[in-house]
Image (cartoon, rainbow, N blue to C red):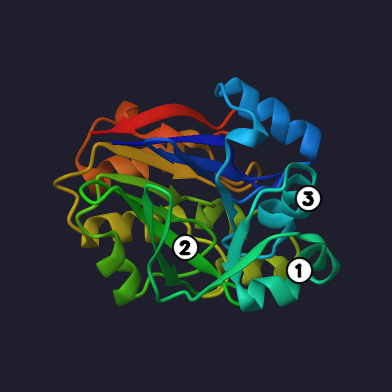
Amino acid sequence: MIRFASLGSGSEGNGLIVECASTRILVDCGFNVSDTVKRLARRGLEPGDLAAILITHEHEDHAGGVARLARRYDIPVYLTYGTLVAMGAKGAMIPRVSLIDSHSPFAIGDLEVHPYPVPHDAREPAQFVFSDGDKRLGLLTDAGASTPHIERMLSGIDGLVLECNHDLGLLMNGPYPPSLKRRISGRLGHLDNATAASIVAGIDCTRLQHFIAAHLSASNNTPELARTAMAAALNCDPAWVCIATQGDGVDWRSIS
């Protein structure tokens, strides 16, 4: 059985706990140490419970708190070489580094980790599918577009945490400068609701037990817009679509 919970999701910080048997992994840590400890405590955990920290890419809202947390609690960190280099001095602070290849599966304790590359404006970004050998949890945040490989990786999963960053209309008619609008909406930016919905519509969702809409922009999206788009793609009640909030994330969900 796989359990997972979000510590928080959005531009101010991200963190996802994935658990199988006695193995618990923190995917990304965009919060400072004291905030991370508090957020872990809400899920009944302490930093010493973590077998590893896994980083998707170097941006501050995903990796800003990793080095200090790993250093203080001696937690091994898994990341691509490009991400390590892009983290600079913070990467050099990490005491125990394990480099990963974005095409090669590996194991951390009881969890199988299947990385895959994504289009995003980072040095060597990767997203992940987690498995206990039977059930699979997919994670896709911080990607500007879908690819056939992404859809192959996510097809047939049992749980999905998917970026629904913005509504394109709200973004383009909002206050952001044109350069930032182009970055967010571009192929190396973030998934909008419609693109996220097209990903869901293009994969096999017959086994899906949980769907979490993540990384919503506070300025350029609303939970209602994300729920409506995802519910149409999933052919489900909008209330079934869960939103990972910035303040509290999502409580434990079990895939069995």
Image spot of residue 115 (x, y percent): 42, 66
The local crowd at label 2, few if under 14, some if 14 to 19, many if 20 or more residues have their Cα within 10 Å, is many
Q: Quadrant of residue 235?
A: top left
Mark-to-mark CA distance, 3 and 1: 15 Å
Looking at the image, which residue is at 63% across and 55% down?
76
User: According to the image, label 1 marks what residue?
Assistant: 87
Residue 5, position as x, y percentages in the image? 48, 34
Q: Is residue 170 visible?
A: yes
Q: Residue at x 68, y 65 (%)?
A: 58
- Separation of marks 1 and 2 at Cα, in angstroms: 17 Å
Which mark is first along the chain, 3 or 2? 3
Residue 129 location (% of width, % of height): 37, 57
Query: In the rendered structure, which disc, 3 or 1, sits on the residue that comes first in sequence?
Result: 3
Looking at the picture, which amino acid does disc 2 mark?
A: Gln
Badge number at residue 240: none
Element type at mark 1: helix
Left or right of residue 101: residue 66: right
The quarter of the picture where the C terminus appears is top left
Q: Which of 200 and 167 lies nearest the eye of the viewer?
A: 200
Local secondary structure at mark 3? helix
**Nearer mark to the viewer, of 2 and 3:** 3
155 lies left or right of 22: left
Seen from the viewer's position, the closer of residues 151 and 74 is: 74
Q: How many marks?
A: 3
| Residue 237, quarter of picture | top left
Mark 1 crowdedness (10 Å alpha carbons): few <14, some 14-19, many ≥20: many
User: Of the residues tagged 3 and 1, which is closer to the observer?
Assistant: 3
**Which amino acid lies under the numbered mark 1 shown in the image of this protein?**
Met
Q: Which of the marked residues, 1 or 2, is nearer the chain's N terminus?
A: 1
- Which residue sits at x=77%, y=66%? 91
Q: Where does label 2 land, which residue?
A: 127
Q: Name the residue tied to disc 3.
A: 71
